[in-house]
Image (cartoon, helix red, strand yellow):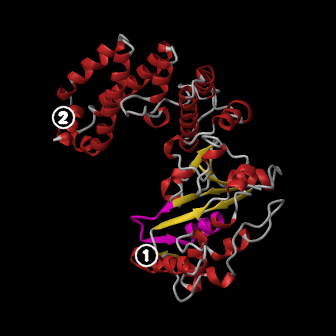
Amino acid sequence: NPIIFTNGDNDTFPLWYNQDVEGHRTDARVCNLSYLQTDWYIDQMRRPAWNSPSLPITWKRWEYVDNMGHDMFFIKPEAKEQLLQLKHDFQAEGKKDDPFELKYIIDNFVRNPEIGFVPTDSIVMTVDKAAVLRSGMKLPHGKDSIPDKMFISLRGKRILTKSEMMVYEMLAHHDWTRPLYMSTTLGGDNQAGLDNYLMLEGLAARVTPFKLGDSGVDTERMYDNFMKKFRFGNVADPKVYIDQTIMRMCYTHRMRMVQLAAQLAKEGRKKEALEVLNKCEKVFPAQQVPYDFFSLGFSPNGRQFLMPQLYHELGRDADARRILTAVAKNTMQYMNWASTLPESRLASYGNTLMQKIQVLQIALEGLTEIKAPEAKVYDNFLKNLERTPAGQVIIQRMM
């Protein structure tokens, strides 16, 4: 009975089709955050659907309908003093209630029609450790690493949308018995400030009580998904046309596979890391899905493309050279083409050209590190770039 939060057409409708038409995983609930801003959709989420129980939303309907003015909830950190006084009073009375607790804030402030706002930008949520153990989620550092509390920071935010509040409501009441997932296509703005608590398992990331930052990868589940369960259709067939929308999806898949390979290599599982990279090349060949800076990823120092860097570290310099050369060649060709444009048009390509020169510099650094002969070609190209129209635009932007 998992819940997966999605946001747009491409990460929502295929899942609905798969459930409604094909009958797959009808125990899972797809919850679209764009729709969760409306009362009629919250109505749907509060009802069972197929084999999925209703979602853990305890609000009464009158509390979330549009005419109550609850399309958004203001965050007022200046009211924190009130919570501190409450906490002092509770301790004096021997009560265990914590007014900074997520559930307490929602039930006593947000849902209170006379208040209706969030009185702090720092929220905590007590973690039921036994429930976390029963959940089957990956424990990054063993069972003793489960934290007592989660800390949710709202600093810098002025409002919470209704959909964000419903996510917090579900987080407060799911008791870790129903896995909460976020589609990896959501983006940070739609993750309700939980991005540091996400554990990547494939194309979805699981909400956990562990503060993971960018290192949250469940390599066991993710390897099993990408290498054994996922199907990639006919993307590799040169007769198949990859349109712009599908190309973006392919880039996302490649990026996630590179991320998986990087984590496997970090864990010392070099054989599996190489298997993932090789499968990525097989299902997303460059002639169908050209290399780009987004899908190749960046090394931790930000100075190398991650995919060829991993090949280099795994003793496969020929593959690293092939990828880096393809990136450098494509970038050089773009700059040469840009130089053929009229001056009036070329100026409008300034931002793209700035991005391209950075890509070429990173590719050149990688080629230089593996001592590839192509490094000299692209080094000379960069040295002479200022003599070209595209180079002049770049220089003007840099100045």
Residue 15: x %, y % from top left: 71, 52
Q: Secondary structure at mark 2?
A: helix
On screen, residue 310 versus residue 201, left or right, reads left
The C terminus: image quadrant: top left
| 38 up-or-down from 222: above or below | below
Q: Nearer the viewer, residue 256 or 74?
A: 74
Please name the residue that numbered disc 2 is placed on: 392
On screen, residue 125 versus residue 119, left or right, reads right
- The picture quadrant where one finds residue 202 is top right
- The picture quadrant where one finds residue 48 is bottom right
- The picture quadrant where one finds residue 237 is top right
Q: How many numbered tags mark residues here?
A: 2
Residue 223: x %, y % from top left: 66, 32
Q: Residue at x 68, y 34 (%)?
A: 220
Q: Secondary structure at mark 1?
A: helix
Magenta segment range? 152-171
Residue 298: x %, y % from top left: 43, 34
The answer to whether one can see residue 179 in this image is no
> Magenta segment: does it hold 154?
yes
Q: Compute the Cα span from label 1 to label 2.
A: 54 Å
Residue 169: x %, y % from top left: 63, 69
On screen, residue 302 versus residue 138, left or right, reads left
Q: Which mark is residue 127?
A: none
* Disc 1 packing (10 Å; few <14; some 14–19; many ≥20): some
Please name the residue that numbered disc 1 is placed on: 80
